[in-house]
Amino acid sequence: MLDDLWNSTYALLSDTEFWLAVVSTLVKVIVILVLARILLGVLKRVITQILQKREGKYVNVSEQRSKTLTSLLHSVVANVVYFIAILLVLDELGFNLASVLVGAGVLGLAIGFGAQNVVRDVITGFFILYEDQFSVGDYITTGQYTGTVIDFGLRVTKIQDWTGEVNIIPNGHIEDLKNYSKENSYAVVDMRVSYGHDLEKLQQLIMDASLVVYHSNENMIEKPDMLGIQEISESGAVIRVIALCKPVMQWGVEREIRRAILDSFAEKGIDVPYQQVTVHQKEA
Amino acid sequence: MLDDLWNSTYALLSDTEFWLAVVSTLVKVIVILVLARILLGVLKRVITQILQKREGKYVNVSEQRSKTLTSLLHSVVANVVYFIAILLVLDELGFNLASVLVGAGVLGLAIGFGAQNVVRDVITGFFILYEDQFSVGDYITTGQYTGTVIDFGLRVTKIQDWTGEVNIIPNGHIEDLKNYSKENSYAVVDMRVSYGHDLEKLQQLIMDASLVVYHSNENMIEKPDMLGIQEISESGAVIRVIALCKPVMQWGVEREIRRAILDSFAEKGIDVPYQQVTVHQKEA
Amino acid sequence: MLDDLWNSTYALLSDTEFWLAVVSTLVKVIVILVLARILLGVLKRVITQILQKREGKYVNVSEQRSKTLTSLLHSVVANVVYFIAILLVLDELGFNLASVLVGAGVLGLAIGFGAQNVVRDVITGFFILYEDQFSVGDYITTGQYTGTVIDFGLRVTKIQDWTGEVNIIPNGHIEDLKNYSKENSYAVVDMRVSYGHDLEKLQQLIMDASLVVYHSNENMIEKPDMLGIQEISESGAVIRVIALCKPVMQWGVEREIRRAILDSFAEKGIDVPYQQVTVHQKEA
Amino acid sequence: MLDDLWNSTYALLSDTEFWLAVVSTLVKVIVILVLARILLGVLKRVITQILQKREGKYVNVSEQRSKTLTSLLHSVVANVVYFIAILLVLDELGFNLASVLVGAGVLGLAIGFGAQNVVRDVITGFFILYEDQFSVGDYITTGQYTGTVIDFGLRVTKIQDWTGEVNIIPNGHIEDLKNYSKENSYAVVDMRVSYGHDLEKLQQLIMDASLVVYHSNENMIEKPDMLGIQEISESGAVIRVIALCKPVMQWGVEREIRRAILDSFAEKGIDVPYQQVTVHQKEA
Amino acid sequence: MLDDLWNSTYALLSDTEFWLAVVSTLVKVIVILVLARILLGVLKRVITQILQKREGKYVNVSEQRSKTLTSLLHSVVANVVYFIAILLVLDELGFNLASVLVGAGVLGLAIGFGAQNVVRDVITGFFILYEDQFSVGDYITTGQYTGTVIDFGLRVTKIQDWTGEVNIIPNGHIEDLKNYSKENSYAVVDMRVSYGHDLEKLQQLIMDASLVVYHSNENMIEKPDMLGIQEISESGAVIRVIALCKPVMQWGVEREIRRAILDSFAEKGIDVPYQQVTVHQKEA
Amino acid sequence: MLDDLWNSTYALLSDTEFWLAVVSTLVKVIVILVLARILLGVLKRVITQILQKREGKYVNVSEQRSKTLTSLLHSVVANVVYFIAILLVLDELGFNLASVLVGAGVLGLAIGFGAQNVVRDVITGFFILYEDQFSVGDYITTGQYTGTVIDFGLRVTKIQDWTGEVNIIPNGHIEDLKNYSKENSYAVVDMRVSYGHDLEKLQQLIMDASLVVYHSNENMIEKPDMLGIQEISESGAVIRVIALCKPVMQWGVEREIRRAILDSFAEKGIDVPYQQVTVHQKEA
Amino acid sequence: MLDDLWNSTYALLSDTEFWLAVVSTLVKVIVILVLARILLGVLKRVITQILQKREGKYVNVSEQRSKTLTSLLHSVVANVVYFIAILLVLDELGFNLASVLVGAGVLGLAIGFGAQNVVRDVITGFFILYEDQFSVGDYITTGQYTGTVIDFGLRVTKIQDWTGEVNIIPNGHIEDLKNYSKENSYAVVDMRVSYGHDLEKLQQLIMDASLVVYHSNENMIEKPDMLGIQEISESGAVIRVIALCKPVMQWGVEREIRRAILDSFAEKGIDVPYQQVTVHQKEA
C-alpha cells in the first residue's frame, strides 16, 4: 500500500496538467494580492483627498480631528479589502468556502440581530464625531436627558445632570439633539400684571429693571428687548421681555431680571397678581 | 520538474482550444465594457432630459439646483454601471465571485441593518433638496422642533430655536414638516368679554383697535377680519379677529393687536374678565 | 501563436455543433422577444378594459383621470416585461447573470431598506389618485394636520393650514383621512343654561335664534334641528341645536348662531351661566 | 457557412436522441397541464363544499355573499395554479428561469416591502366581508373614527361622521371595531343629587320620569331599570337609570330621559346640584 | 421523422440502464410513501398520548375539547407530512422543483407579509382554546374592550359591551386578558368622611350597613371586611370596606352597600363631605 | 421488457462499483450515528456539570428545580442532535433534501412569523423558571397587572388581582417585573399639617402614634423611622414616617398608622388641614 | 455477491488515485488545524494587548475586571475558531454539510427570532460590565425603575426599590440609565413666599437656615448657594437654594433644609403662603 501511495505521488508530480494547475493558481493568487494592494492605495488616497477638501469647504474640521478620522477610515478600508482578498485566495487554493460561509452567515445573523444595536451605536458615534454635533463640555438635551457632556466614546456618551447625576446613553439613542453651547441664547421673562394698570408705564418699568441687569451682568450681551403683550389670560395680561445672553447663561440672567422687576414693582407699589376671581354672590 | 512545468506551459500555448477560450473571453470583456459605456451615455441623457422637462413643468427648480442635481445623479449612475460592469468582467476572467459576494453580502447585511438609518437620512435629504421643501433661512416645525433652518446637509439639518439653541436633526426624522416661510399667515387674536355687554359694540371696538395696527404696521398686509363669537365659555364670550400678515410676522402683529385692544378697553372702561364664578351662599 | 489562433477560429467556424448552438440561441432569443411583445399587448388590453369597466361601475373616474391612469399603468407594465425579456436574452447569450444579480440584489436590499419609504409614498399616492380620496382644494384632516390641499404629487401632498402655514406630508403618512369637502356638514352649537329656567321656553328661544340665521345665511341648507338636553353638567344644563350646512361652511354658521342666541338671551334678560358653586359656610 | 448550418440542422433532425428529448419534454408538459387541470378541479370543489358547509353551521352567510366569495376564491386559486404550471412548463422547455426568478424576486421584494400594506388591506377586507363584521349602513367605531359606513371596498372603507365629514380608512387599519347596529343598546343616564335628600323618593321620581319616556318613545323597547347609587362624589350622590333601546337610538332616548327628569325635579322643587363646597372661614 | 421517433422510443425501451433508473425511482417512491405513512402514525399516537397525559395533569381539559384538539392536530400533521412526501416524490420523478419553489416562495413571502396577521390570529385562537383562557359567556377585559364573550372563533372573538355594542376583535390582539368570571371578586366601597368625627364609631356604622346588605343579598358570599383608613385626602379621611361576591356580581353589591351607608348616615345625621376649603380672609 | 428489467438488475448486482458505493454509504451512516451518540453523551454531561456548578455558586437552585431543568435540557439537546443526524443519513442515502428543505423552509418561515410569539413566550418562561424570578404565590407587578401568581406555565402566567379577577399573561409579555414577596418592604405614611404648628412636637406625636402600631402589630419588624419634612405644599407641610414590614404587609400597616395618627391628632385637638386658600377681598 | 464486494474493495485499495485523494485530504485537514491554531494564538494576543492598552488610556478598568474580560473573550474566540475549523474539516472529509446547514439554519432562524432578546440581553450585559456603567450597590434609574442594584448577571439585573420591592430587569431593557452614585449631587430646595415681603431679607434668612444645616450635617460638602428667584407663580415668588452633597445623600439634606427654613420662618413670623386668590365681589 505504501508503495501505491508513493507511485501515485510520483505520477502526480510528473504530470504536466498538475503543474499547469499549480502555476495557474499561483498566478491568480499573486494577481489578487497585487490588485488588493493597488485598490487599497487608491482608496486611501481618495479618503485623504475627500477629507482635505471637506476641511476647507463644508465642515469645520480641526486638523486634529481630521487626522483621527483619516486613520480610522484607512484602517477600516484596509481590513475590508484584505478580508475579501483572503477569501478570494482561499477560494483559489481549493477550499470550499461556500458552506462555511453560509454556516457562519446564519450564526452571524443570529448574533447580528442581537448586536445590531452596537453597530448602530458606533455608526452614530462616528457621525457625531465627524459632524462635530457636540464636544465634551457642551450642555445638550437629547431625548429626556439634559446636562453637560462629560465623556464621549464611540459607543456611549455620558451626560451629567446639573444636579450631578451621571446619565449613560448609547450613541444610537442620540437621534435628535439640542445643543445649548453653540450659540448665544435669549433669556425670556414673562411678567403677569392685573388689568387696569397703564400698560405703557408697566412696560417701561419692566424695561428699566431689565436694563439695570444689563449694566451689571456681563452675561447679557445685548440690551433687552420689550416684546409686548404675550397673552391675555384669566389672571392678567402677560408682558414678555427678552435679552440675548452668552450660551448657557440665560437662566441666571432670567433670575436676576425677575428679581429686579419684583424689586421695582415693590418700590412703585404695583402688586403682582395672584389668581383673580370675580364672584357673583347669590343667596341660595 | 521544471522541465515538466515548461513542457506543460508550451503545450498549453500551442493548444487551439486554449486560444479559442482566450479570444472568446476577450471579446466578451470588450462587449461588456462597450455596452456599459453606451448604457451610461443613454442614462445620463435621460436624466438630463427629465430634469430639464421637470424644470419647466412641475417643480420650481432653480438653474443652480438643477445643475447640482444633474451632476449628483450622473455620478451615482456612473458608479452603479461601472460596478456591475467590473463584476461581469471579473466573472468572465474566471474569478469565482459567488462565494465572495455571499460572504460580503452577509457582512454587508450586518452593517446594513445598523447603517440603514444613514441611507434613509441621505435619501430623505435628497428629496428635501429635490422637492424644495425648505431652504436655509426658513422658519419650520418638524416633530418637536421649531425654528430657523441655519444649515442643511445631505444627512442632518440644523434648526435654531428662536431662543438661540441649535437643534441637530437627521434628515430621516424630518417626515412631516410645517413651513411658515412659504405663504402669508393669519394673526389670530381671541378676546374674552363678560356676558351682558352689547356684542355689536364690542366687536366694533375690537375691529377699530385692529385697524389702528393695520395702518401703523406694514407687516399686516390686509385689513383685519372680524370672525365673530368663537366660543361661549364659562368665563365669557370669546370674540375672534384675524389679520393676514407677512410670513413669520404674525406673532408680532398679534402682540400689537392685543395691546391696542387692551388700551381701547381701558379707555372705554370695559373690563377684561377674570375667572367668573356665581356663588350660591348656604349656611351649613 | 497567431497561426494557432487563426486555425482554432477557422476550426470553430467550420464546426457543425457551433452553428447548431448559434441557431438554437438565435431562435430562443427571437421566441423570447416575440412572446414578450405578445404578452405586453395582452396586458395592455386587459388594463384598458378593466379601467373602462370600473369607470362605469364602482368608481367615479373622470375621463381625464382614466387616461392618466391607463398610460401610467401601460408604461409600468412595459418596463417590467422588457426588463425580464432582456434578462432572459442575456442569459441565453451566455452571460452568467446569477452572481451579478446576487451582488446587485444585496446592494439593492441595502438601499431598499432605506428607500422603502419612497416606494410606499408613491404606492399610497397612486391609490389616493385612483380612489379619488381627495382633490386639490379639498379641506382635509390627516394625522395631526388639517387644512386645504394646495398641491398633490405622487410622493408628497401639501396642505395649507387655515392660518396660512404650508404642511408638507409624504403620501405614505396619509393613512386615514377625514375629508370635509365631500358632503354637507352639521353646525353644532351647545348652549349652557342654569337650572331653574323653563326648559321648553329656552329651547324655543334657541330654535328661534337659529331660524333667524337660517333665513339670512344661505350656507345653512336645512332648517335647524333642536336635539334637546345633551348634558347635565355641574355648571348647568347643555342644550344642543344642529343645522345642516354646505361643506366647510359649518364653522361660520356656528359663530352666527352663537351670536344670535346671545343677542336673544340678552334681549329676554336670560343670563348665560358662569361657573356655579354652592358654598356651605362654616365658622372654623 | 450556410451549408454548415444546413448540415448541422439536418444532422440534428435525424438524430434519435434529439427526438427522444423532444418526446420526453412533450410528455412532461402534457402531464403537467393535465395535473394542473385536475388539481384545479379538486380545489374548486373543496372550496365550494367548505363554503356550503359553513353556510349552514358557523357563519350566517347569505346566498348572495356565498356566491361572491365562491367565485372570488375560484379565480384566485385558478390564477395561482396556472402560474405555477406555466413556470414548470417553461422550465421543461429549457428556459433557465432561476436567474430571472431571482432577479424578479429581488425587484419584487423591494416593491413588496412598500406594497405589503396594500396586500394587508385586501386580506383584511376579505375577512370583513367573509365574517360579515359590518355592512354598509352600520354605525361603527374603529380606531379614532366613529360613524356610518357609507362605502365598503376591498381596500378602503368610508365612514361618515354624524356631523357629515367623510373618513377614508384603509381596511388594514380596521383591526378591532365596535358595531352599534348589531344589537339593542342601553341608554344610560347618570343623575347627580345633593346629599340630604330622601334617596328612595328621588329614585322613584327618576324612575317615573323614565317611564313617561318609555310610554311615549317607541325606540325604548323595555321598561327602564333603576340601578341605584353609582358613585358618591364630592358634588353629590349619582343615581343611574338604564333603558334598553333599538340600536343607535340610545342617545336620543338619553336626551329625552334627561329632559323628563329635569322637568320632574323642577316641578317638585328639587334642585340639581352645582359644584358643592364647604368653606371653613378663618380670619388671617 | 416519425420513423426516427419510433426507433428512438424502441431503443430507449430496450436499454438496460433506462429500466434500472425506472426501478430505482419506483423503489425510492415507495420507500418515501411508506416512511411518510409510518411517520404519520407515530406522530398521531404521540399527539394523542400527550393530550391524554395533559388531561390528567396540568390543564383542566374536558373530554369534548380534547377530541376537538386531537382531530385538529391530526389533520394539521397529516397535511404537512403528505405535502413534504409529495415534494419528495415529484423530485424523484425528475421534476425540477427548485426554481418553482423559489418562485412560489417569493410569491408566498409577499403574501405572507400581508397575511401573517391571519396566521397569528389563528395560532393565538388555538392557544386560547387549548389553555381554556375564556369561554363564551365569560365577562373579560382585553385591551380597551370589556364585555361578555358572545362568540369565539379561530380568527376573531366577539365581545358585547354591557351597554349592548358588539366588539369584534382579531384573536391576535388578545394578548393579555382579565377574566372576571373565573373567581369570586371583592366589592370595594371607599367612603369619604370629614375629619373631626369619631373614626371608631364611623367604621362601625359603615360595617353595620354593609352587614345589612350581606343578609339581604345572596351575591355577597362572605361577611364584609373593614380595611380601615385608606387615604388621608384634602377632602376628608377615606374608609374602605370590602366584601367577597360571586363573579361579576360585585358592582351591584357595591351599589347596594353605597345606598345602605348613605341611608345610615342620613339617619344618624352624619353629613357626607363635599369639597372642603379653609379660607383665610385678608382685606386687599 | 421484463427480461430487460431482470437483466439490468442482475448486471447491477454483479457490478463492483455498485457494492463499493453501498459499502461506503453504510460506513458513513454508521459513523454519523456513532458520532451523534458520542456528541449527545458529551453534551448531556456538560449540561449536568454546568447546572451542578451553578447550584453551588451563582443561583439559588433547589434540587427539585435542578432536576426539572436538567431533564428538560437533555431532551431538547437529544432532539436537535438526532434531527441533524437523520438529515445527514438521508442525505447519504441519496435523497435530495435541498429542495424539500427550501420548500419546508419557506412554509416554516411563513408560520414562523406568526408563531414567533409562542417561541418567545416559552423561552421567557424557561428563563423565569431558571432564574427563579417568581414562584406561585408571589405578589408581583408586571406591565399593567398587579396581583398574586396563581399559576405558572411555560407559555402563560396567571395573576389574580387582589379584588379577585384572573389575569392571563403570555410569558413573553413579562419583560420587567416587580416582586413584592422577595424582601421586606417599607410602609410609607405622608401626613399633611398646616403651617404655624410646632413641627418638632408634631413629628414627635406622629412618631409616638407609629410606635403604638409597632408594639401591637407584628407585621412591622423594625421601629418606625421619622424622615422629616418631605414637601412644602400649597396645603401645608408634609411629614413622612416609614416603617419596615414583612413582605406584602406594608399596606395594612400603613392603614393602621394612619388611623393611629388621626386618633392622636383628634385627642390633642390638632386639625388635619383641608385645602387652604388665602382670599384677598376686593370690591369690584 | 460477497466476492464482488471483496474484489471491489481490493481494487479500490490498490488504486493510485484513491490514495492520492486520501493524501490530499489528510494534508488539507492538517493545514486547516494548524492554521486555526495559529489564528487563535494571534487573536488571543491581540485581545490581551488591546485590553491592556485600554486599561491605561480610555477606560478605568481594574485589574480584576480586566482578567475576567480577557478570559471571557478568549473563550468566545476559541469557540468560534474551532467551530469554523471543524466545519472545514468535515467538508473536506466529504460530508455534504450544505443541506444540513440550510436545514439547521431555517430551524435556527425560527428559534433565533424568539431568542434574539436573550442574545441582546447578554450583549448589553457585556457592555455594562466592560464600560463599568454601574456596580452592585449603586443607586440607579433605568426606564421606570429606580433603586439600588442588588444583583448583576449577564442576562438580568435586580434593582431594589428604596421601599424594598425587588425589580428584575433584562439587561437588554437597560438602554439609558442615570447613575446617582458616581458623582456628588445637589440638594435643591424651592421655597415659595408671598409677594410684598423684602426679597433681600428673605433670601438671607433662607441662606442662614441652609448654613445651619451645612454646619451640622457632614453630607453637605460645600456651602449652600443662593440661586435667586426661580419662578413668579400665581401663589408667590419661588426662591431656590442649592447645596452640593455626597452621592445619594441629597434627599436627606433637602428635608433638613426644609425643616430649618420652616423653623426660621416660624421664629420670624413669616407665613408660608397657601394658595392665594384675589376675589372681586359683585352682587348678582
Image (tube, coloured by chain):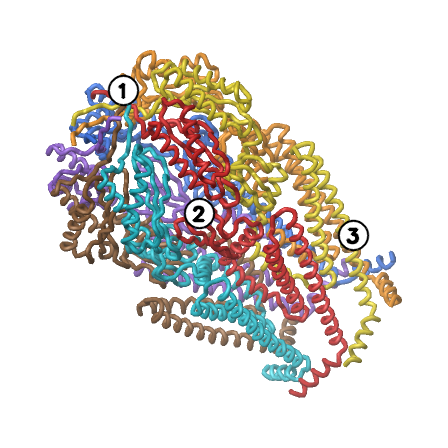
Chain colours: A orange, B blue, C purple, D brown, E cyan, F red, G yellow
Q: Secondary structure at mark 3?
A: helix
Rendering coords of residue F41 (x, y %):
69, 61
Q: CA distance from mark 3 to mark 1?
A: 95 Å
Rendering coords of residue D221 (x, y %):
20, 58
Horizontal side, residue F172 vs residue E235: left or right: right
Which kind of residue does numbered mark 1 sit on? Lys
Q: Nearer the viewer, residue C167 or B126?
A: C167
Q: Which residue is mark 3?
A: G34
Rendering coords of residue A256 (x, y %):
43, 17
Horizontal side, residue D273 vs residue E146: left or right: left
Q: CA distance from mark 1 to mark 2?
A: 48 Å
- Which quadrant of the figure contains the C terminus of chain D? top left
Q: Residues within 10 Å of mark 3 (few under 14, many from 20)?
A: few
Q: Residues within 10 Å of mark 1 (few under 14, many from 20)?
A: some
**Res. B154 in view:** no
Q: Nearer the viewer, residue E88 or E226?
A: E226
Which kind of residue does numbered mark 3 sit on? Val
Q: Nearer the viewer, residue B106 or E76?
A: E76
Return the chain for callout 3: G
Q: Which mark is residue E282?
A: 1
Horizontal side, residue C189 vs residue A261: left or right: left
Toward which corner of the image does residue C257 lie, by quadrant?
top left
Q: Which mark is residue F146?
A: 2
Rendering coords of residue D11 (x, y %):
65, 76
Q: Say if G198 sits above or below E81 in the image.
A: above
**Identity of the residue drawn at 82% across and 60% down:** B8
